Image: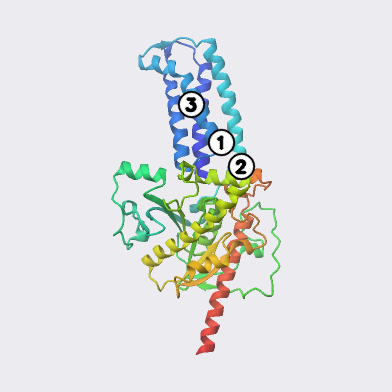
Amino acid sequence: MFDLFLGQCLVLLLLFISGVRVFFIKNPKIDAATVVSPFSFIVSLLVIAIWGFSYISLALCCLSFVVFVTNLRAIFRLSAELFVDHYSAVFIVASVIETVLTLVLAAAVLYFRPVRCVPTDFGVDKTVLSVNGNAASGFRVDSGILPETLEDADFSKVAELSDFSRVKEFFLGHSVSGTVTIYSPTEKVEWISSDDSLLNGIDFFIGPHDVVEPFESNDDEPAVEALSAAEAPLLIFVGSALAETFCYEPYFVFLAQKGFTVITADFFAPDMRLFNDRRDSRIFRRFSVVRAMLEGGEEFERIKGEMAAFTQKGYEALSSLVLEKYGNERKVFYITDGLSSEQIFAFSDKFPGSVEGMLQMEFIPEYKNVGLGFIEQTDILLAHRLGIARDGEFFIPRYLSFKTVQQLAGFVAEKKSRRKVSD
């Protein structure tokens, strides 16, 4: 979501240029700077189209529209190549008000900015694919943007769409019905260790004078050991309408940094609708569900039940897609947030021999935001609304990545011991 912050900053910069230009005209000239007003409005619309609807993005869009309307006369003068020797008092007052509002919005954007988490800064590659299909018949990777990581995928059921239709359907959330995101280490590793800087306070990406106290180990937890990269399973996660992949990105980045390949998906297929109206579109879905959560009531209880069922279908669909590409002999490990054990077994039992295990994030006591992801890094406005402090140190995502490796190592060690006993 840091890209969203940069997009919002671009809109603010354009608005600021449009507003302050009235103070710098000294000689008659063509008012070329007026072109930034329509550009600011266009960029604000693109911000919503690409990253989804939010209150801050809506405020930026409304202010950009007001600035655009205010500058219409100046735009017509520019198109006629007329010189401007002064601005009217009304226009100057309007520009001052718009500049003040721009500065107020800039303060809000800076205050609620997400914590910067760029995968490449941590030695992690991130690949995003679009997929077509639905939960009933399955999903296929869009052949139009095929990367090397999925070169062997089966495209026999990919819908043929024109470029315009592809973009239209993506934003409406119909035929192009989801995204698959792959986090993988930039450099391959031979061993994946469950050791972590959280245990000794070293290399924790915090201030040079800060100290991280080690966690107390639990004697009932599986033994900590290293995994060879060859036996490490693929980590599978499916986001919900309430918390999409970006809400968990710091956690996935730290897992990939350790050497895992993490494959996540967000689906918004026609047969996975919660509202049966425009709120199901990719742009408005998360905003609508978060709003329903904050309001509470029977409506959100209904949404929660359907959302869990759709997430369950999403895991089944992503598992089929991954195993189709990598082969049924490849092991997968499920990471879930808020699904019950019965729901997990409902889809994991359909892939016998391929499932290495699962981690239910809600059972880790340090993880408090069940069903919401790591909003203390990715959605500061929602975190503030829920009374959760901003965390720029990635403490909990790092700790959960350690616990994930620890639990995986325990599963592998237990299976090895069983094989030895059977032999």
* Residue 97 in the image: above or below residue 46: above
Q: Residues within 10 Å of mark 1 (few under 14, many from 20)?
A: some
Amino acid beneath label 2: Leu
Amino acid beneath label 1: Ile
Question: Which residue carries the number 2 mark?
Answer: 381
Amino acid beneath label 3: Phe
Circle 1/circle 2 CB separation < 8 Å: yes
Q: Residue at x 37, y 45 (%)?
A: 169
Mark 2 or 3, nearer chain start = 3
Q: Residues within 10 Å of mark 2 (few under 14, many from 20)?
A: many
**Residue 15's spot in the image, x, y percent?**
51, 27
Query: Is residue 262 visible in the rendered structure shown here?
Result: no
Mark 1 or 3, nearer chain start = 1
**Residue 165's spot in the image, x, y percent?**
32, 43
Task: Work out which residue is located at the far bottom of the displayed protein and give it.
Answer: 423
Question: Which residue carries the number 1 mark?
Answer: 56
What mark, if any, has residue 65 been given in the picture?
A: 3
